[in-house]
Image: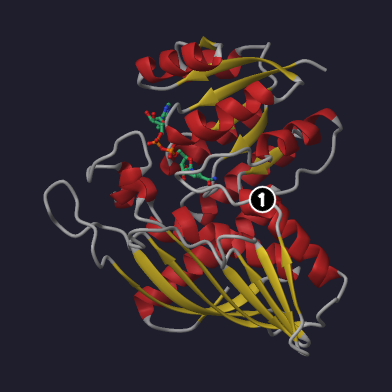
Amino acid sequence: MSITAGIIGCGSITRYRHAPEYKANPHVSKIVFYDRNPERAEALAELFGGTTAGSVEALLNDPEIDVISDCSSNEYHHIHTTNALLNGKHVLCEKPLSLTLEQAEGILSAQEQSGKKLMVDHNQRLTKAHQEVKRIIKNNELGKPLTFKTTFGHQGPEHWGFNKSNSTWFFKKERSGLGVAGDLGIHKIDLIHYLLDDEIEYVSAFKGALDKVDENDQPIQVADNIVCSLKTKKGVLGSASFSWTYYGEEDNSTIIYCEHGIIKIYTHPDHQIEVIRSDGGKVHYQLESIQTNDNQSNTGVIDAFIKAVRLDEEPVVTGHDAFSSLKVILGILEAADTQKIVKI
Ligand SMILES: NC(=O)c1ccc[n+]([C@@H]2O[C@H](COP(=O)([O-])OP(=O)(O)OC[C@H]3O[C@@H](n4cnc5c(N)ncnc54)[C@H](O)[C@@H]3O)[C@@H](O)[C@H]2O)c1
């Protein structure tokens, strides 16, 4: 099967992940780029070898195109992903799926109506370390998980996106919507759901725009930091922090405390997992380092998406998975706003 991929949005995630990963996939023969800033599409078509579309309609109506990556900014996902599905394309949508549950429901019903694949780029599930930890927990090697701590933070999206300045859309309420919660937090919520085979049911949280300022030197309209407490349906208790102000080094670590030991993930530069058993025995796993903003390696997301399309399989991250994580993130923001415990 020879697949043609169309990409909407030619910023950083397309440049560093989608385009190189489509190019490297042996089943993808052509990439068509579209951006509302045409010069960005042209630059990537030249860099990766591909063509450009003159409008989003031209891209979505192109019968040659089988799959679409929706890499537009957050406020457009529900429009482009819905239209692409209804135009008969399989879609890999960037996270967060959308800004509201109503928009997300619209996407899910378009997926059902179209019968096409919808995958959402919660790529943390695919790292070798997270897959190994999933196996350890599933095989009950350390007994039941009891509590966890997880964090995801870096120095902020103004160092990552196409617009590397304080006027970035990531800082705008109407465009990013969910701030650091939708940018980084949603990855960790999806990861906890995946690793524990469970869902967050109760949340409490604090949030703040502690340090980032916009182009007018005013505090940004969305939170740059969130700290929260979480309780899952199975009764596991955890804490999570999401930050755009971890200056100096990214932190993408998770620790899971089980009945018979501890699993530490991405806490040490030389190994990706450390298992510490209750008798003190330790095992270190050297797998592969996680992608950071400064270290872009293949996430496996495009390969997983193309495999689901080719073999007519359920994607590894479904629209329903992404809907569940979005629901938790909206609950965390509500809890921080109301200073109440929120049931998801
Ligand atoms: N999965 C991950 O780990 C990960 C990491 C970073 C970003 N993202 C997500 O990827 C998406 C894009 O982020 P980015 O970092 O590439 O941002 P970016 O600002 O670097 O690029 C976005 C590009 O999309 C274009 N665009 C926006 N809306 C458009 C529209 N309606 N039609 C056509 N083009 C449009 C912009 O012109 C810009 O070139 C966001 O939803 C973000 O949350 C995911």
- The type of residue carrying mark 1 is Glu
Q: Is residue 200 above or below residue 79?
A: below
Q: Is residue 126 above or below residue 246?
A: above
Asked if residue 185 shows in the view, the reply is yes
Q: Is residue 312 above or below residue 173?
A: above
Residue at 59 percent across and 51 percent down: it is: 290
| Quarter of the view holding residue 227 | bottom left
Q: In this rendered view, identify the residue nearer to me: 174 or 191.
A: 191
Residue at 56 percent across and 15 percent down: it is: 32
| Quarter of the view holding residue 333 | bottom left
Q: Position of residue 159 (x, y in %)?
A: 33, 44
Q: Is residue 134 above or below residue 293?
A: below
Q: Position of residue 161 (x, y in %)?
A: 37, 39
Q: Is residue 190 left or right of residue 134?
A: left
Give the quarter the ligand 1 occupies. top left
Q: Is disc 1 placed on a helix, strand or loop?
A: loop
Furthest-left residue in this view: 216
- Residue located beneath label 1 in the image: 288
